[in-house]
Amino acid sequence: MSHWSIPLSPLAEASLVSAEYSFDQITWISVSTQVDRDPTIKSCTGDDVLKFDVGTKGSEPTYYRVTFDQSFGTNSFATSYIKTGGGRNGCNLYYFAGVGGTTND
């Protein structure tokens, strides 16, 4: 995987504080919190996405975290898009337990 693009609900997008990734869950590296179109997946979606422009290294995992200024429910089937460095072409949908579209009041 070369990068991961995640659509957010408008409420989650407005509440976005930070986004980070780590290769060891100890050292976290900040990434841009700009939510915008990802031209590399324009044939897959017209949605704005939060793009983690870092992927995996071989079979080693990469960890991602996003912080919001309010609590949200969980969407058990949140949709995202992954781009490979080669190999799989097309719209590579990835479903994960992600942020829901509404707050937990």
Image (cartoon, rainbow, N blue to C red):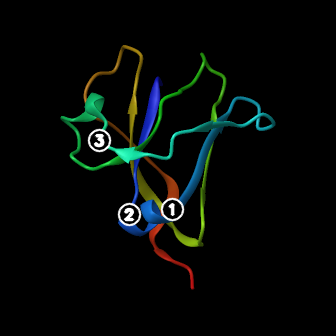
Identify the residue shown where x is 31% and y is 49%. Answer: 48
User: In this image, 62 relative to 32: left or right?
Assistant: right
CB under 8 Å between discs 2 and 1: yes
User: In this image, 29 relative to 84: left or right?
Assistant: right
**What residue sits right under mark 1 in the picture?**
99
Of badges 2 and 1, nearer the viewer stands 2
Q: Which x, y percent locates residue 51? A: 44, 39
101 up-or-down from 59: above or below: below
Of badges 3 and 1, nearer the viewer stands 3
Identify the residue shown where x is 57% and y is 24%. Answer: 56
- Tag 1: residue type? Val
Q: Which x, y percent locates residue 89? A: 28, 22
User: In this image, 82 relative to 99: left or right?
Assistant: left
Q: Secondary structure at mark 3?
A: loop
Q: Tell me the CA gap for discs 3 and 2.
A: 14 Å
Q: Which mark is residue 42?
A: none
Of badges 3 and 2, nearer the viewer stands 3
Q: Which x, y percent locates residue 72? A: 54, 71
- Residue sitting at the far right: 26
Q: Residues within 10 Å of mark 2 (few under 14, many from 20)?
A: some
- Tag 3: residue type? Arg
Q: Secondary structure at mark 2?
A: loop
Identify the residue shown where x is 26% and y is 31%. Answer: 39
Q: Secondary structure at mark 1?
A: strand
Q: Tell me the CA gap for discs 2 and 1.
A: 9 Å
- Tell me which numbered mark, 3 or 2, is placed earlier along the sequence: 2
- Tell me which numbered mark, 3 or 1, is placed earlier along the sequence: 3
Q: Which mark is residue 37?
A: 3
Q: Tell me the CA gap for discs 3 and 1.
A: 19 Å
Q: Which mark is residue 9?
A: 2
Q: Residues within 10 Å of mark 3 (few under 14, many from 20)?
A: some
